[in-house]
Image (cartoon, rainbow, N blue to C red):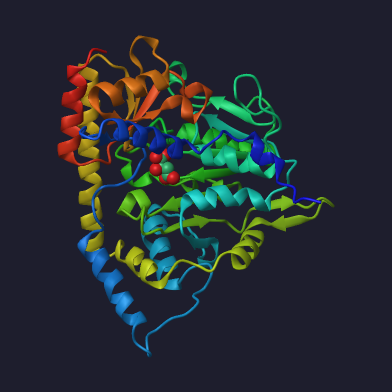
Protein backbone atom coordinates (compact mmCIF):
# COMPACT_ATOMS: atom_id res chain seq x y z
CA UNK A 1 0.00 0.00 0.00
CA UNK A 2 1.19 3.46 -0.82
CA UNK A 3 -0.26 6.85 -0.18
CA UNK A 4 -2.10 8.16 -3.21
CA UNK A 5 -2.06 11.80 -4.18
CA UNK A 6 -4.67 14.26 -5.35
CA UNK A 7 -4.47 13.57 -9.08
CA UNK A 8 -5.95 16.98 -9.84
CA UNK A 9 -2.55 18.48 -9.03
CA UNK A 10 -1.14 16.64 -12.04
CA UNK A 11 -3.35 18.79 -14.26
CA UNK A 12 -1.55 21.97 -13.18
CA UNK A 13 1.26 23.69 -15.05
CA UNK A 14 4.69 22.60 -13.75
CA UNK A 15 5.10 25.71 -11.64
CA UNK A 16 3.20 28.77 -10.55
CA UNK A 17 3.75 31.67 -12.99
CA UNK A 18 5.72 33.90 -10.64
CA UNK A 19 7.87 31.01 -9.46
CA UNK A 20 8.69 30.33 -13.09
CA UNK A 21 9.67 33.96 -13.64
CA UNK A 22 11.82 34.01 -10.50
CA UNK A 23 13.63 30.90 -11.77
CA UNK A 24 14.25 32.43 -15.20
CA UNK A 25 15.58 35.57 -13.52
CA UNK A 26 17.85 33.57 -11.23
CA UNK A 27 19.29 31.68 -14.21
CA UNK A 28 19.90 34.95 -16.03
CA UNK A 29 21.59 36.52 -13.01
CA UNK A 30 23.80 33.47 -12.48
CA UNK A 31 24.96 33.72 -16.07
CA UNK A 32 25.21 37.53 -16.02
CA UNK A 33 26.23 38.48 -12.49
CA UNK A 34 27.31 41.99 -13.54
CA UNK A 35 23.95 42.98 -15.03
CA UNK A 36 21.66 45.27 -13.08
CA UNK A 37 18.22 43.81 -13.72
CA UNK A 38 15.16 46.02 -13.23
CA UNK A 39 12.21 44.03 -11.92
CA UNK A 40 8.84 44.90 -13.39
CA UNK A 41 7.48 41.39 -13.23
CA UNK A 42 5.61 40.38 -10.08
CA UNK A 43 3.39 43.12 -8.71
CA UNK A 44 5.39 43.70 -5.55
CA UNK A 45 5.67 47.12 -3.99
CA UNK A 46 9.00 48.86 -3.37
CA UNK A 47 8.05 51.69 -1.02
CA UNK A 48 8.33 50.88 2.70
CA UNK A 49 5.35 50.92 5.05
CA UNK A 50 4.41 54.51 5.84
CA UNK A 51 5.43 56.32 9.07
CA UNK A 52 2.00 56.19 10.69
CA UNK A 53 1.53 52.54 9.84
CA UNK A 54 4.95 51.63 11.24
CA UNK A 55 4.26 53.52 14.46
CA UNK A 56 0.98 51.65 15.01
CA UNK A 57 2.75 48.38 14.15
CA UNK A 58 5.56 49.05 16.68
CA UNK A 59 3.21 50.24 19.41
CA UNK A 60 1.20 47.05 19.03
CA UNK A 61 4.38 44.97 19.27
CA UNK A 62 5.16 46.80 22.53
CA UNK A 63 1.70 45.94 23.81
CA UNK A 64 2.52 42.29 23.19
CA UNK A 65 5.54 42.57 25.50
CA UNK A 66 3.51 43.70 28.50
CA UNK A 67 1.65 41.26 30.74
CA UNK A 68 -1.38 43.59 30.93
CA UNK A 69 -1.76 44.30 27.22
CA UNK A 70 -0.51 41.01 25.77
CA UNK A 71 -2.98 39.25 23.47
CA UNK A 72 -3.17 35.61 22.51
CA UNK A 73 -5.61 34.26 19.94
CA UNK A 74 -7.74 36.96 18.42
CA UNK A 75 -11.11 36.53 16.72
CA UNK A 76 -10.67 34.42 13.56
CA UNK A 77 -12.72 37.00 11.63
CA UNK A 78 -10.49 39.89 12.73
CA UNK A 79 -10.56 42.45 15.54
CA UNK A 80 -13.59 44.71 15.63
CA UNK A 81 -11.42 47.87 15.57
CA UNK A 82 -10.26 46.94 12.06
CA UNK A 83 -13.60 45.60 10.86
CA UNK A 84 -15.31 48.83 11.92
CA UNK A 85 -12.60 51.01 10.34
CA UNK A 86 -13.04 49.12 7.06
CA UNK A 87 -16.81 49.58 7.01
CA UNK A 88 -16.55 53.24 7.95
CA UNK A 89 -13.84 54.14 5.44
CA UNK A 90 -14.14 51.74 2.52
CA UNK A 91 -17.93 51.40 2.21
CA UNK A 92 -19.96 53.95 4.18
CA UNK A 93 -18.76 56.94 2.10
CA UNK A 94 -20.24 55.31 -1.05
CA UNK A 95 -23.50 54.54 0.74
CA UNK A 96 -22.80 50.81 0.98
CA UNK A 97 -24.07 49.10 4.12
CA UNK A 98 -21.92 46.26 5.34
CA UNK A 99 -22.52 44.53 8.68
CA UNK A 100 -19.60 43.70 10.93
CA UNK A 101 -20.25 39.96 10.56
CA UNK A 102 -19.93 40.26 6.78
CA UNK A 103 -16.25 41.27 7.01
CA UNK A 104 -13.56 38.61 7.31
CA UNK A 105 -10.00 39.84 7.86
CA UNK A 106 -7.36 37.56 6.39
CA UNK A 107 -3.72 37.29 5.42
CA UNK A 108 -4.26 37.90 1.73
CA UNK A 109 -6.60 38.18 -1.21
CA UNK A 110 -4.58 35.44 -2.91
CA UNK A 111 -5.42 33.06 -0.05
CA UNK A 112 -9.07 34.11 0.09
CA UNK A 113 -9.70 33.99 -3.66
CA UNK A 114 -7.96 30.62 -3.65
CA UNK A 115 -9.78 29.21 -0.64
CA UNK A 116 -13.30 30.47 -1.30
CA UNK A 117 -14.08 27.72 -3.83
CA UNK A 118 -13.84 25.12 -1.03
CA UNK A 119 -17.27 26.00 0.29
CA UNK A 120 -18.95 25.43 -3.09
CA UNK A 121 -19.88 22.10 -4.69
CA UNK A 122 -17.57 20.41 -7.16
CA UNK A 123 -20.32 20.37 -9.79
CA UNK A 124 -20.33 24.17 -10.11
CA UNK A 125 -19.33 25.58 -13.48
CA UNK A 126 -16.49 28.07 -13.11
CA UNK A 127 -16.17 31.04 -15.40
CA UNK A 128 -13.10 33.27 -15.66
CA UNK A 129 -11.80 36.09 -17.80
CA UNK A 130 -8.87 35.21 -20.04
CA UNK A 131 -6.16 36.40 -19.35
CA UNK A 132 -6.55 35.85 -15.64
CA UNK A 133 -4.71 35.89 -12.33
CA UNK A 134 -3.71 32.19 -12.26
CA UNK A 135 -4.82 31.53 -8.67
CA UNK A 136 -8.53 31.38 -9.56
CA UNK A 137 -8.08 28.68 -12.16
CA UNK A 138 -5.38 26.69 -10.39
CA UNK A 139 -7.32 26.39 -7.13
CA UNK A 140 -10.40 25.15 -8.98
CA UNK A 141 -8.28 22.65 -10.90
CA UNK A 142 -6.77 21.43 -7.60
CA UNK A 143 -10.29 20.88 -6.30
CA UNK A 144 -11.36 18.98 -9.40
CA UNK A 145 -13.47 21.56 -11.26
CA UNK A 146 -11.10 21.91 -14.23
CA UNK A 147 -12.00 18.83 -16.27
CA UNK A 148 -9.20 17.81 -18.62
CA UNK A 149 -6.48 19.87 -20.29
CA UNK A 150 -7.32 20.69 -23.89
CA UNK A 151 -4.83 20.99 -26.76
CA UNK A 152 -4.45 24.71 -26.28
CA UNK A 153 -3.77 24.38 -22.55
CA UNK A 154 -7.18 25.50 -21.31
CA UNK A 155 -9.36 23.34 -19.06
CA UNK A 156 -12.36 21.62 -20.60
CA UNK A 157 -14.82 22.35 -17.76
CA UNK A 158 -13.93 26.02 -17.29
CA UNK A 159 -15.67 28.76 -19.23
CA UNK A 160 -13.29 31.48 -20.44
CA UNK A 161 -14.28 35.04 -21.37
CA UNK A 162 -11.60 36.29 -23.69
CA UNK A 163 -10.33 39.87 -23.17
CA UNK A 164 -8.16 41.27 -25.93
CA UNK A 165 -7.62 44.56 -27.72
CA UNK A 166 -10.35 43.46 -30.16
CA UNK A 167 -13.03 43.77 -27.47
CA UNK A 168 -11.28 46.52 -25.51
CA UNK A 169 -10.67 43.99 -22.76
CA UNK A 170 -14.37 44.00 -21.85
CA UNK A 171 -15.46 40.41 -21.25
CA UNK A 172 -18.61 39.31 -23.03
CA UNK A 173 -21.21 37.71 -20.81
CA UNK A 174 -20.96 33.91 -20.82
CA UNK A 175 -23.12 32.26 -23.48
CA UNK A 176 -24.11 29.45 -21.14
CA UNK A 177 -25.24 29.36 -17.52
CA UNK A 178 -22.28 29.38 -15.14
CA UNK A 179 -22.16 29.25 -11.36
CA UNK A 180 -19.00 30.89 -10.06
CA UNK A 181 -17.78 33.94 -11.99
CA UNK A 182 -14.37 35.35 -11.11
CA UNK A 183 -13.93 39.03 -11.97
CA UNK A 184 -10.91 41.15 -11.08
CA UNK A 185 -11.25 44.89 -11.75
CA UNK A 186 -9.12 46.95 -12.09
CA UNK A 187 -7.86 43.91 -13.87
CA UNK A 188 -4.80 41.90 -13.16
CA UNK A 189 -3.08 41.48 -15.60
CA UNK A 190 -4.43 43.87 -18.24
CA UNK A 191 -4.83 46.93 -15.99
CA UNK A 192 -8.15 47.68 -17.68
CA UNK A 193 -11.44 48.43 -15.93
CA UNK A 194 -15.20 48.01 -16.24
CA UNK A 195 -17.47 51.00 -15.86
CA UNK A 196 -20.68 50.84 -13.84
CA UNK A 197 -22.85 49.78 -16.79
CA UNK A 198 -20.49 47.04 -17.82
CA UNK A 199 -20.25 45.67 -14.29
CA UNK A 200 -24.03 45.96 -13.84
CA UNK A 201 -24.48 43.53 -16.74
CA UNK A 202 -22.58 40.90 -14.80
CA UNK A 203 -24.67 41.52 -11.69
CA UNK A 204 -27.86 41.13 -13.77
CA UNK A 205 -26.49 37.98 -15.38
CA UNK A 206 -25.66 36.54 -11.95
CA UNK A 207 -29.17 37.29 -10.73
CA UNK A 208 -30.79 35.70 -13.75
CA UNK A 209 -28.63 32.59 -13.56
CA UNK A 210 -28.33 32.25 -9.77
CA UNK A 211 -24.58 32.61 -10.10
CA UNK A 212 -22.17 34.07 -7.56
CA UNK A 213 -19.57 36.65 -8.61
CA UNK A 214 -16.21 36.48 -6.88
CA UNK A 215 -15.06 40.06 -7.27
CA UNK A 216 -11.38 40.74 -6.67
CA UNK A 217 -10.98 44.46 -5.97
CA UNK A 218 -7.38 44.29 -4.77
CA UNK A 219 -6.41 47.20 -7.04
CA UNK A 220 -9.35 49.54 -6.35
CA UNK A 221 -7.19 52.21 -4.69
CA UNK A 222 -5.47 52.86 -8.03
CA UNK A 223 -8.73 53.94 -9.69
CA UNK A 224 -8.55 57.50 -10.99
CA UNK A 225 -11.58 57.77 -13.27
CA UNK A 226 -15.04 58.59 -11.94
CA UNK A 227 -17.17 56.02 -13.69
CA UNK A 228 -15.12 53.07 -12.47
CA UNK A 229 -16.68 51.32 -9.47
CA UNK A 230 -14.37 50.73 -6.50
CA UNK A 231 -16.68 48.08 -5.11
CA UNK A 232 -19.12 45.75 -6.84
CA UNK A 233 -21.61 46.74 -4.13
CA UNK A 234 -21.92 50.13 -5.83
CA UNK A 235 -24.18 48.21 -8.22
CA UNK A 236 -27.74 47.85 -6.93
CA UNK A 237 -28.52 44.37 -5.68
CA UNK A 238 -24.93 43.14 -5.91
CA UNK A 239 -24.97 42.03 -2.28
CA UNK A 240 -27.35 39.26 -3.35
CA UNK A 241 -24.86 37.85 -5.84
CA UNK A 242 -21.28 38.88 -5.02
CA UNK A 243 -18.40 38.29 -2.65
CA UNK A 244 -15.72 40.99 -2.69
CA UNK A 245 -12.02 40.62 -1.94
CA UNK A 246 -9.85 43.56 -0.88
CA UNK A 247 -6.23 43.80 0.16
CA UNK A 248 -3.84 46.11 1.99
CA UNK A 249 -0.97 44.68 -0.10
CA UNK A 250 -0.88 47.03 -3.05
CA UNK A 251 -2.89 49.79 -1.37
CA UNK A 252 -0.64 50.23 1.63
CA UNK A 253 2.48 48.17 0.93
CA UNK A 254 1.49 45.08 2.93
CA UNK A 255 2.76 42.46 0.45
CA UNK A 256 5.24 41.21 3.05
CA UNK A 257 3.18 42.19 6.10
CA UNK A 258 0.01 40.36 5.00
CA UNK A 259 -3.45 41.74 5.57
CA UNK A 260 -6.58 41.65 3.47
CA UNK A 261 -10.30 41.19 3.89
CA UNK A 262 -13.28 39.58 2.24
CA UNK A 263 -16.90 40.68 2.33
CA UNK A 264 -19.35 37.78 2.34
CA UNK A 265 -22.88 39.26 2.38
CA UNK A 266 -25.57 37.57 4.44
CA UNK A 267 -27.90 37.84 1.43
CA UNK A 268 -25.90 35.12 -0.36
CA UNK A 269 -27.23 31.58 -0.49
CA UNK A 270 -26.24 28.34 -2.17
CA UNK A 271 -28.15 25.07 -2.39
CA UNK A 272 -27.17 21.89 -0.59
CA UNK A 273 -27.42 18.64 -2.53
CA UNK A 274 -30.87 18.08 -1.03
CA UNK A 275 -32.05 21.48 -2.21
CA UNK A 276 -31.84 23.34 1.10
CA UNK A 277 -30.88 27.04 1.03
CA UNK A 278 -27.58 27.49 2.88
CA UNK A 279 -26.03 30.80 3.94
CA UNK A 280 -22.68 31.33 2.22
CA UNK A 281 -21.64 33.74 4.98
CA UNK A 282 -22.19 31.06 7.62
CA UNK A 283 -20.24 28.48 5.64
CA UNK A 284 -17.29 30.83 5.15
CA UNK A 285 -17.36 31.65 8.84
CA UNK A 286 -17.34 27.92 9.60
CA UNK A 287 -14.43 27.41 7.24
CA UNK A 288 -12.38 30.30 8.59
CA UNK A 289 -12.93 29.47 12.26
CA UNK A 290 -11.78 25.92 11.56
CA UNK A 291 -8.81 26.55 9.29
CA UNK A 292 -7.59 30.03 10.19
CA UNK A 293 -6.52 31.66 13.43
CA UNK A 294 -6.65 35.25 12.29
CA UNK A 295 -4.11 37.89 11.36
CA UNK A 296 -1.67 38.93 14.08
CA UNK A 297 -2.69 41.82 16.35
CA UNK A 298 0.22 44.13 15.36
CA UNK A 299 -0.55 43.64 11.67
CA UNK A 300 -4.22 44.48 12.23
CA UNK A 301 -3.23 47.59 14.20
CA UNK A 302 -0.93 48.56 11.32
CA UNK A 303 -3.81 48.05 8.88
CA UNK A 304 -6.12 50.13 11.05
CA UNK A 305 -3.59 52.98 10.92
CA UNK A 306 -3.99 53.14 7.13
CA UNK A 307 -7.42 54.68 7.85
CA UNK A 308 -6.14 57.48 10.12
CA UNK A 309 -5.95 60.96 8.62
CA UNK A 310 -2.15 60.84 8.44
CA UNK A 311 -2.15 57.23 7.27
CA UNK A 312 -4.55 58.00 4.43
CA UNK A 313 -2.40 60.91 3.31
CA UNK A 314 0.81 58.86 3.32
CA UNK A 315 -0.79 55.99 1.46
CA UNK A 316 -2.22 58.29 -1.15
CA UNK A 317 1.26 59.73 -1.71
CA UNK A 318 2.64 56.24 -2.29
CA UNK A 319 -0.13 55.34 -4.71
CA UNK A 320 0.37 58.63 -6.56
CA UNK A 321 4.06 57.78 -6.82
CA UNK A 322 3.33 54.43 -8.45
CA UNK A 323 0.73 56.00 -10.72
CA UNK A 324 3.33 58.54 -11.87
CA UNK A 325 5.52 55.57 -12.81
CA UNK A 326 2.56 54.10 -14.68
CA UNK A 327 2.18 57.33 -16.62
CA UNK A 328 5.87 57.38 -17.49
CA UNK A 329 5.66 53.80 -18.73
CA UNK A 330 2.53 54.54 -20.76
CA UNK A 331 4.00 57.66 -22.36
CA UNK A 332 7.41 56.17 -23.08
CA UNK A 333 6.07 52.98 -24.64
CA UNK A 334 3.49 54.86 -26.71
CA UNK A 335 6.30 57.07 -28.00
CA UNK A 336 8.13 53.91 -29.04
CA UNK A 337 5.08 53.01 -31.12
CA UNK A 338 3.91 50.17 -28.89
CA UNK A 339 0.23 49.53 -28.22
CA UNK A 340 -0.33 49.73 -24.52
CA UNK A 341 -3.35 49.29 -22.27
CA UNK A 342 -4.08 49.77 -18.59
CA UNK A 343 -1.95 51.94 -16.33
CA UNK A 344 -4.67 54.61 -15.99
CA UNK A 345 -6.61 53.11 -13.07
CA UNK A 346 -4.12 50.41 -12.29
CA UNK A 347 -0.44 49.78 -11.58
CA UNK A 348 -0.27 47.31 -14.48
CA UNK A 349 0.53 48.19 -18.07
CA UNK A 350 -0.39 45.58 -20.67
CA UNK A 351 1.86 45.84 -23.68
CA UNK A 352 1.08 44.36 -27.09
CA UNK A 353 4.27 42.71 -28.25
CA UNK A 354 5.88 44.29 -31.31
CA UNK A 355 5.73 42.42 -34.63
CA UNK A 356 3.40 39.79 -33.19
CA UNK A 357 6.18 38.32 -31.11
CA UNK A 358 5.23 35.54 -28.72
CA UNK A 359 4.96 36.70 -25.12
CA UNK A 360 7.90 34.67 -23.87
CA UNK A 361 10.08 35.79 -26.82
CA UNK A 362 9.39 39.40 -25.90
CA UNK A 363 10.08 38.56 -22.25
CA UNK A 364 13.47 37.09 -23.27
CA UNK A 365 14.26 40.05 -25.51
CA UNK A 366 13.62 42.51 -22.70
CA UNK A 367 15.60 40.46 -20.21
CA UNK A 368 18.58 39.87 -22.48
CA UNK A 369 18.77 43.21 -24.27
CA UNK A 370 17.46 45.65 -21.67
CA UNK A 371 17.81 43.63 -18.47
CA UNK A 372 14.18 44.24 -17.60
CA UNK A 373 11.90 41.55 -16.17
CA UNK A 374 8.25 41.70 -17.18
CA UNK A 375 5.61 38.99 -17.06
CA UNK A 376 4.80 37.09 -20.23
CA UNK A 377 1.12 37.63 -21.02
CA UNK A 378 0.63 34.02 -22.07
CA UNK A 379 1.37 33.02 -18.47
CA UNK A 380 -2.04 34.49 -17.64
CA UNK A 381 -3.88 32.44 -20.25
CA UNK A 382 -4.43 31.83 -23.92
CA UNK A 383 -5.69 35.35 -24.69
CA UNK A 384 -2.61 36.79 -23.00
CA UNK A 385 -0.44 35.44 -25.82
CA UNK A 386 1.13 38.33 -27.69
CA UNK A 387 1.17 40.61 -24.64
CA UNK A 388 3.52 41.35 -21.77
CA UNK A 389 2.72 42.91 -18.41
CA UNK A 390 4.88 45.57 -16.76
CA UNK A 391 4.30 46.85 -13.24
CA UNK A 392 4.62 50.42 -12.01
CA UNK A 393 5.77 49.27 -8.57
CA UNK A 394 9.47 49.84 -9.05
CA UNK A 395 11.18 53.08 -8.01
CA UNK A 396 10.85 56.21 -10.13
CA UNK A 397 14.58 56.06 -10.94
CA UNK A 398 14.42 52.43 -12.06
CA UNK A 399 11.23 53.04 -14.03
CA UNK A 400 12.88 55.90 -15.94
CA UNK A 401 16.03 53.84 -16.44
CA UNK A 402 13.96 50.91 -17.74
CA UNK A 403 12.17 53.15 -20.25
CA UNK A 404 15.51 54.58 -21.36
CA UNK A 405 16.87 51.08 -21.89
CA UNK A 406 13.79 50.06 -23.87
CA UNK A 407 14.18 53.06 -26.15
CA UNK A 408 17.66 51.81 -27.08
CA UNK A 409 16.77 48.30 -28.14
CA UNK A 410 15.51 47.38 -31.56
CA UNK A 411 11.82 46.52 -31.26
C1 LIG B 1 0.90 39.77 -9.52
O1 LIG B 1 2.03 40.14 -9.84
O2 LIG B 1 0.06 39.38 -10.32
C2 LIG B 1 0.57 39.82 -8.08
O3 LIG B 1 1.60 40.36 -7.34
C3 LIG B 1 0.32 38.52 -7.56
C4 LIG B 1 -0.30 38.57 -6.22
O4 LIG B 1 -0.75 39.60 -5.73
O5 LIG B 1 -0.35 37.49 -5.65
Q: Percent position (x, y) of residue 290?
A: 63, 67
**Whole-percent x, y for residue 53 in the image:** 27, 64
Which quarter of the rendering shows the C terminus?
Answer: top left
Give the vertical position of 122 relative to 308 (above or below): above
Q: Is residue 129 visible?
A: yes
Q: Quadrant of ligand 1?
A: top left
Q: Is residue 15 above or below residue 255?
A: above
Is residue 172 something one can see in this rendering?
A: no
Q: Which residue is farthest right? A: 274
How many callouts does the rendering have?
0
Residue 375 placement: quadrant: top left
Measured from the top left, where is residue 240 in percent x and y? Answer: 61, 49
Q: Is residue 267 left or right of residue 102?
A: right
Residue in front for this viewpoint, 219 or 11: 11
> Between residues 101 and 306, which one lies in front from this camera angle?
306
Q: Quick check: 196 left or right of 284?
A: left
The residue that appears at 45% across and 72% down in the rendered structure is 80
Quarter of the rendering containing residue 354: top left
Which residue is pictured at 56% across the width and 40% down the height? 136
Q: Is residue 245 above or below residue 155?
A: below
Find the residue positioned furthest to the top.
Answer: 355
User: Residue 59: horizontal and vertical position, in percent?
Assistant: 28, 76
Amino acid sequence: MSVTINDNYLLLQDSYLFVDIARRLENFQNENPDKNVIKMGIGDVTKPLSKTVIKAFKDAVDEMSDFNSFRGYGPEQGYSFLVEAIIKNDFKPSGINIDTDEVFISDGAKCDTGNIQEIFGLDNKVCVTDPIYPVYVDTNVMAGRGGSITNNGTYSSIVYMSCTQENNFIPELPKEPVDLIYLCFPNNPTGTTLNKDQLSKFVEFAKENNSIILFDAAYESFIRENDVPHSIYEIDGAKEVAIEFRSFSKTAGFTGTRCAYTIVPKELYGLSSNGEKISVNELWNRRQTTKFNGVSYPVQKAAEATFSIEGKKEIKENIDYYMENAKIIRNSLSNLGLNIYGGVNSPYIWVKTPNNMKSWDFFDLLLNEANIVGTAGSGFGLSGEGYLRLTAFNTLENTKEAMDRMSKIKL
